Image: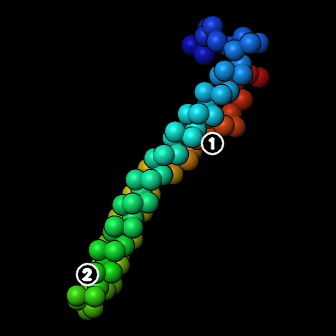
Amino acid sequence: MLFANPLVTREGIGLVLAFSALGAGLSMIAGIGPGIGQGYAAGKAAEAVGKRPKLQPLVIRTMLLGQAVAQTTGIYALIIALLLLFVNIFK
């Protein structure tokens, strides 16, 4: 479908590249969510360890597992942004 697109002409290549750069920037907005979520999780884990120091290994292990799962959204957004920026569709 990409090659049947009327924008993919000599004049439209700049427009397609501009919109792919805009899409890459918009996809990186998805990095805000994991950052906020991981900060909140780390704060609550520190609070839990402060209340019950004996449960520190369990709390830290659970926090790290949750942060690893939360980080996947940011990694997927980074991959999409890199694909939009560096894959040359005009070869």
User: Residue at position x 63%, y 42% from top?
Assistant: 82
Q: Amino acid at mark 1?
A: Leu
The answer to whether residue 83 is visible is: yes
How dense is the environment of label 2, judged by Cα within 10 Å: few (below 14), some, or many (20 and up)? some
Q: Is residue 24 left or right of residue 31?
A: right
Q: In what element is the residue under mark 2?
A: helix
66 relative to 76, above or below? below
2 relative to 35, above or below? above
Q: Quadrant of the N terminus?
A: top right
- Residue in front for this viewpoint, 72 or 49: 49
User: Residue at position x 33%, y 68% from top?
Assistant: 41
Query: Circle 2 sits on which residue?
Result: 48
Query: Circle 1 sits on which residue?
Result: 82
How dense is the environment of label 1, judged by Cα within 10 Å: few (below 14), some, or many (20 and up)? some
Q: Report how far apart the C-alphas of labels 2 and 1 lie in the structure.
A: 38 Å
User: Residue at position x 48%, y 52% from top?
Assistant: 31
In the rendered view, how is the structure colored? rainbow
Q: Is residue 15 left or right of residue 43?
A: right
- Mark 1 or mark 2, which is nearer the start of the sequence? 2
The quadrant holding residue 87 is top right
